[in-house]
Every structure is written in structure tokens, then in C-alpha cells.
Amino acid sequence: MASTAAASRRHKKIIVVVGPTGCGKTKLSVELASKFFPQSEIINSDKIQVYKGLDITTNKIPLSERNSVPHHLLGEFDSSESHPEFTPSDYRNSASLVISQILSRRKIPFVVGGSNSFIYALLAKKFNPELDVFSESNPEAESAICRDLRYSCCFIWVDISPAVLNEYLVKRVDDMLESGMFEELGEYFGSDESESVSQCGLKKAIGIPEFEKYFKRFQRKGNDDWRVGDDVEKRRVYEEAVKAIKDNTCQLANRQLGKILRLRDSAGWDLKRVDATAALKAAMGGRRSSDLWEREVLEPSVKILNRFFME
């Protein structure tokens, strides 16, 4: 009887994993959902990863790394001229429907991603699409933020020292380029999609505006002349683009952290912090990091969720 009551409580609750880009949200959520809470499904809340295409550039988790955990709102939408941008209101409607479907299957929804504007739009009981509660220029924004939630939520905040995170993000850009990001962008700029005048949707992905100058200047459709060779000017423009991607990625992480702090401090949302700094630092140093990750991130997260489901 007690287990039945616990199961009933579990299936009325949702998990929300937040944190800046590169902190390990995806890794943590897949491990939690596959190893400890197997009746779970993940809902993406990254505003760029909702779009189809540019999987390397947008850093979507490959199918092979999802451990058979169902993922929703990940690479599902086209960015077209008629509907160029998937807005927070769109996300509120779409993610709410997915949550209802997951709960109807008596499974656990995990909302995971770096777009805090999407997360706020989904979870706030009162949501005004005309007001950006994260705006630094609008003095009314902070006071207008909604404290009340539409769901019973457990928030896990994966935090990392900014200095360590920035070092990792710079390395991650290099890894993405080695994995085919440059070639992927070359195909994108060689397609009709890149000719759109809209600057919304997928075109906001970090990598596109930074490399636009390079591909618009050097790309020749139908052959490989656009690829970086020994040309000094090509190399200069290429390296400028890569530096801009690294700088903009670090700036994005900093903005995301600011929004998380606003959700905690202004909205009063109860964010349970886990610190992944040591694990990430060890991984970058080539040292064994799995034990640190399990001890300082995974195990505390499991304890947090077990307490939440027993409430």
C-alpha cells in the first residue's frame, strides 16, 4: 500500500535540470533517467535545439548517447519564413502538452536545457509573453516575475566555477570543430536555408553569425574551394570566427547563470545546487573524473530526487 502511494506521488511531479551551457545537464539527466528513474522521459528546453538541423553546431545529444530514454522537442521544428521563431509561448503550449502525455503514461517528465526563458514560460503560473522578466533594462521586470509554479517541481541546478567552465567551453568548441562542425556549417551556407533574410530561429545558433563572413566570402558552391587551406586570408577570417564562437559561448553561459540566479533570488524558486567543478576540472586535466562526478553530482542528485518523491 505504501509503495502504491509513493508511485502515485511520483507520477504527479516533474524534474527540472538547469545550469549554464556545458555544465553537464544532459549527461546528468540521461544518467538519472536511465539508471535510477527508468520510467522517465526528457523534454528539451534549449531554444536552439528545438530546431531541425545543425546537430553538431547546436550540440544535440546523439541518439546513441540517449540510453534509450525518450527525448521530446529536440530537433522537431523547422525554422521557416512563415514561422521563423519558436517563442516562449510556443514552448509553454508544446511542453505542457508533452508533460500531460508523459504523466498520463505514469512516467516522470524531466525538463532539461539552458533556455531559462523557456523554463520560466513553461513553469510560471502567470506568464505574460509581452514581458521579459530577465530584462536588465526594464525596471519592472524583476518585480513582475512570478513566484508560483504550475507544477510540483524539483529543480536541480548543475553549477560550475565560471573560470573552469569558460576553460572547458573553449576546449569544447575545438572538439566540436574536430567533430565536423565546420563542414556542417559549410553545407548549411551552401543551402537555400542560409539565404533567408530572417535572423530568427536556427540562424541564432552560435556558429552561424560568426562564420557567415567566412562562408559568404570564400564559399564556392559545387566544389571544395571554401575549405580552409594555406591561404593566409582564409586562415585569418577562420580564426576570427572561431575566437568569436568561443567568446560568445562564454558570454552565453554567463547570461544563463544570471537568469538562474534571478529565478532563485527574485522568483524564490527552490533550486537544489550540485557542484560539478571538480569533476569537470579533473576531466579537462586528463584525470579520472567518473568517481568525482558520481560522488559530487550524480549521487547528491539521486538523494534530492528520492526526497522529492517521498514528500
Image (tube, rainbow, N blue to C red):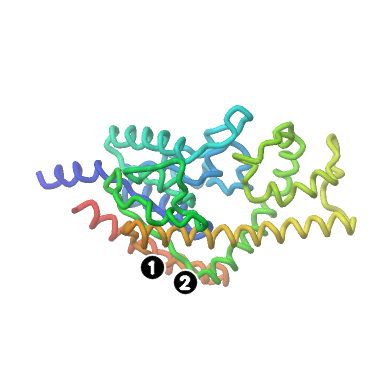
Q: Name the residue under label 1.
A: 296
Position of residue 193 measured from the top left corner of the image (x, y, whole percent): 70, 33
- Name the image quarter holding the N terminus: top left
Q: In percent of the image, x 38 and y 41: which residue is there?
A: 41
Q: In percent of the image, x 19 and y 53: which residue is there?
A: 310
Residue nearer the viewer, 296 or 149: 149
Q: Is residue 130 left or right of residue 304?
A: right
Residue nearer the viewer, 196 or 146: 146
Position of residue 261 measured from the top left corner of the image (x, y, whole percent): 42, 62
Going by the numbered disc 1, the residue's amino acid type is Glu
Question: Which residue is most to the top?
Answer: 82
Residue nearer the viewer, 247 or 61: 247
Q: In this view, does 106 lie to the left or right of 41?
A: left
Would you say the residues marked 2 and 1 are in contact, meaning their CB atoms lie under 8 Å apart?
A: yes
Q: Is mark 2 on a helix, strand or loop?
A: helix
Q: In this view, does 201 lie to the left or right of 93?
A: right
Q: In percent of the image, x 52 and y 57: which residue is there?
A: 137
Q: Mark 2 points at which residue?
A: 278
- Neighbourhood count class around disc 1 (C-alpha, 10 Å): few under 14, some 14–19, many 20 upward: some
